[in-house]
Image: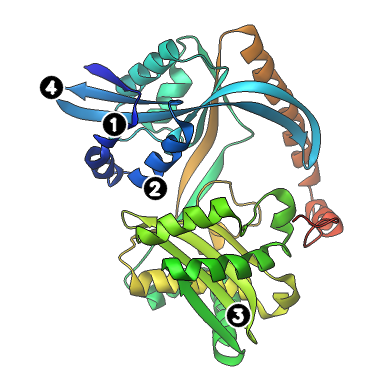
Amino acid sequence: MEIVNCKTLLELNALEETWERLSKQEPIFVPSFSELRAQFELLGSNFRILVAVENFKVLAIACFAYRQGIKRYSIGERKLFDLPVKELELFGSCVLGQAGECVIVKLFKSIKEEANFDLVNVGEIEIDSPLYKAVTNFLGGLVWRATRRNTIRWLIKLPRSFDDYVKSLGPATRKNDVRHFKKFERELASELHIIQRPEQVETFLRDGESISRKTYQWNVGQRLCNDGATRHGFMRLAKEGRLRAYIVYMDKKPCAFAWGEVNHNIYLSNNTGFDPEYRKASPGTAIMLWVIRDLIENTDCKFFDFGTGGDNMNFKSRYGNTSLNVASIQLANYRPYSFVLYLLDEMINGGKNLANAIISQGNFRQRLKRAIRQYGEKKPSLP
């Protein structure tokens, strides 16, 4: 078996058909080749694509992006300090091709010999998958750690009809959420717009940002911004037929949004939000069920992927019907500076996990959230 190292966009473009073919074999959302190319065009020459080839057949592809920047250490929203870092990021948090553990180990050995880095951000990967076993058993000059704790990645295996999906939900969700959704749809002066075309993007981002600024997610960096970079990305998705965004209006005022992208029959949910002024009408619940119904009735999607980040509010587990046990993995080089970064993460995350265990006791966690959560922008407002 040979590991081919691709370093140019010309070599990258030659892999388009293979990337798309192998992406179809993955159980979760994999970014499209156009997304890969767009990201690497921004990086210039700061990427590597490793291809495992045997008897002229591609067994696996792993793409790594070089990023030299600042690593922020913080607790909650409180910044502690920053340190410079040279980081490799595994694009899509996957090695395409359903490769075995031995093949993946060879890919990581190759990138280690090739690259000058402090850390490798592998991302969120399925526990006990070949990739997980490879990076956690590989001791060739790299040490691994799970960033915080293991979690669950939720998905919806979309059935043939929305009624079948509703029947699959838990009794409490059917009684409360579905009832709120039907009431919202039937009785309130609401309308849903589905955003797919380039000419719809500007209005969606304008109205979507007006909602996003009022949510608590805005203060923790989960934002829908009406800026040049976001518009460019949305326009590209729309032109490729992969954008699927939604916005709900009540009395002609925007009150909730959701957006995601489609690739190979999988919808990846990227961001949602609702105006807390309309909380009693449950627009967040309504738009989620609207999205699911639309995907079932009007697309060929087979799965709804909630994406990374766990399920702190038990929101994804209410609607999901299948899941993967996952861990966010980071690798560090066996050298002093890398170990400093590694140990700092270990200490800070250990403290966070201890604090989380303490406040999770009883209903203290819920009371604390109610006490500290503030909706909307912090003042002064951001431009």
Q: Which residue is mark 2?
A: 28
**What amino acid is labelled 2 in the image?**
Ile
Mark 3 and mark 1 lie on one chain; the one further toward the N terminus is 1
**What amino acid is labelled 4 in the image?**
Asn
**What amino acid is labelled 3 in the image?**
Tyr
Q: Are marks 3 and 2 in contact (CB under 8 Å)?
A: no
Q: Are marks 2 and 4 in contact (CB under 8 Å)?
A: no
Give the mark toward the camera: 3 or 1.
1
Give the mark toward the camera: 2 or 4.
4
Between 76 and 377, the one nearer to me in the picture: 377
For the residues marked 1 and 4, what is the alpha-carbon distance in whole angstroms? 23 Å
Quick check: 356 left or right of 199?
Answer: right
Q: Which residue is mark 4?
A: 55
Disc 1 is placed on an element classified as helix
Quick check: 23 left or right of 313?
Answer: left
Residue at 69% of width from left, 56% of height from top? 217
Q: Residues within 10 Å of mark 2 (few under 14, many from 20)?
A: many
Q: Are marks 3 and 4 in contact (CB under 8 Å)?
A: no
Mark 3 and mark 4 lie on one chain; the one further toward the N terminus is 4
Q: Residues within 10 Å of mark 1 (few under 14, many from 20)?
A: few
Instruction: Please identify the quadrant where the C terminus is shown.
Output: bottom right
For the residues marked 2 and 1, what is the alpha-carbon distance in whole angstroms? 28 Å
Mark 2 and mark 4 lie on one chain; the one further toward the N terminus is 2
Q: Which residue is mark 1?
A: 10
Q: Residues within 10 Å of mark 3 (few under 14, many from 20)?
A: some
Q: Where does the image place residue 322, in percent across and percent down from the top left?
A: 43, 55
Q: Which residue is mark 3?
A: 249
Q: Where does the image place residue 214, in percent across and percent down from the top left?
A: 74, 65
Residue 343 in the image: above or below residue 57: above
**What amino acid is labelled 1 in the image?**
Leu
Disc 3 is placed on an element classified as strand
Residue 105 in the image: above or below residue 18: above
